Amino acid sequence: MQSEVYDLIIIGGGLAGLSCAVHLSQKRLKILLIERHSFPHHRVCGEYVSVEVLPYLKNLGVDPMAQGAVSITDLQLTTPGGKTTKHKLPLGGFGLSRYKLDNLIFKRAGETTTMLTDTATSIDPMEDHYEVATKSGKIFRSLFVAAAYGKRSLLDKNMDRKFISKRTGWMAVKAHYHYDHPENLVSLHNFEGGYCGVSRVEDEIVNACCLTTVNSFGKSKSIEDFQRTTMSKNPYLKEFFQSAQPRFDTPLTISQISFEKKSAVENGIFMLGDSAGLIHPLCGNGMAMALHSANIFSNLFLEYFKGTQTNRELLEQLYRKQWHSTFSGRLKTAGWIQKILMNNLASNVALEIAGIVPALVPVVIRKTHGSVFV
């Protein structure tokens, strides 16, 4: 039986995949998006987004601020021992749950894009196209495939991507709470073996998302035990977990988080969002990077389809180059910051310096964020 043919198949329905689908289908391209989960659903995520993405989202027909997003202007940093410092964010951000933001873009995508709830099991290069097979037994064809499935997938293993064979010692835990947290504040609380970001989202919900090493977590019997012992050595987190009322029956978790270097194009497949590279969550900019990568790819892809340039190898080169120039500096800075925060002595010294020379903090933050784009 002849399989359906598309201009582009997108695998993964997170921010990168959904926004890419809307962007391109608005230009009358035939797009198929394959996502294994039905919408709406929660994801492990810090849920703080830089305002650099707002014009782009509005161009896609999505206005987070009109949907209850909370404006965030200030940053608080604390050390495991309780030292703290506060700063104005140079650009600012907003808080909106992934449950709501993803669903808003999903609804826009559904107006112009073919959406399939299924799991992509293989991407096979043919002589002049790709064939994508799914768990349900369907096969789809396209000249191009974009992978936007997140931090890691069995498809990474099938493509023999270098990072997938390396064990990683990182895991993340996220949950929503009822708690009296300042609306305009995102706080980053450091503890032994990790850090936890706390901020407001819509409907007076507070999101707490923590990144920790498996070794640190492994000393505890449960997530609650970890919060009560290791994390609560930070007095701010102790007060939070004693007072906050959980909205989830069970926190969401994800393991095997890799910060290894990835390629923006793999075997001719264009990688979007976390599939191309993961920024340390402490920088609070992974969602902005996902949206920005979708914008970069979509604009280049449209130039190809307009016939402005018709060389596929050049398209791959241009995407690699723009991805690298846009994000490599952010990733390096984020890695440097993480090393400081994961060292108790270094984090205390860093906060002392931040208190003495507060103007340094916005400078560092700018290096992990980008400019406004449309």
Image (cartoon, grey):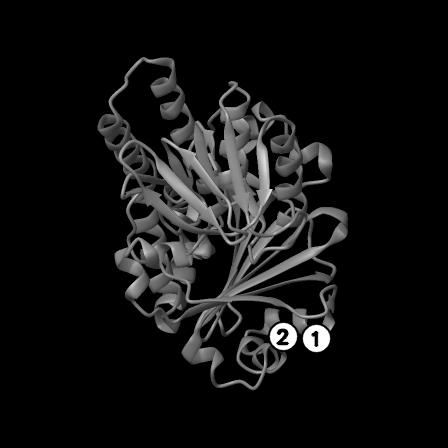
Left or right: where 39 falls relative to 158: right
Q: Nearer the viewer, residue 54 or 156?
A: 156
- Outermost residue toward the front in this view: 1
Determine which residue is flagged by label 2. 238
Residue 14 visible in rendering: no
Report x, y in % for residue 38: 65, 49
Can you tell which mark lies on residue 242? 1
Amino acid, disc 2: Lys
What separation in Å lies between label 2 and label 1 (alpha carbons)?
6 Å
How crowded pointer 1 is (Cα within 10 Å; few <14, some 14-19, many 20+) is rated as few
How crowded pointer 2 is (Cα within 10 Å; few <14, some 14-19, many 20+) is rated as some
Left or right: where 202 falls relative to 58: right
Amino acid, disc 1: Gln
Left or right: where 234 falls relative to 324: right
Residue at x-position 64% and y-position 31%: 108
Residue at x-position 64% and y-position 57%: 207
Report x, y in % for residue 118: 56, 49
Q: Nearer the viewer, residue 42 or 361?
A: 42
Residue at x-position 23% and y-position 26%: 314
- The picture quadrant where one finds residue 173 is bottom right
Q: Nearer the viewer, residue 296 or 20?
A: 20
Residue 251, above or below 185? below
In contact (CB < 8 Å): disc 2 and disc 1: yes
Report x, y in % for residue 348: 41, 68
Residue 47, above or below 243? above
Report x, y in % for residue 232: 58, 77
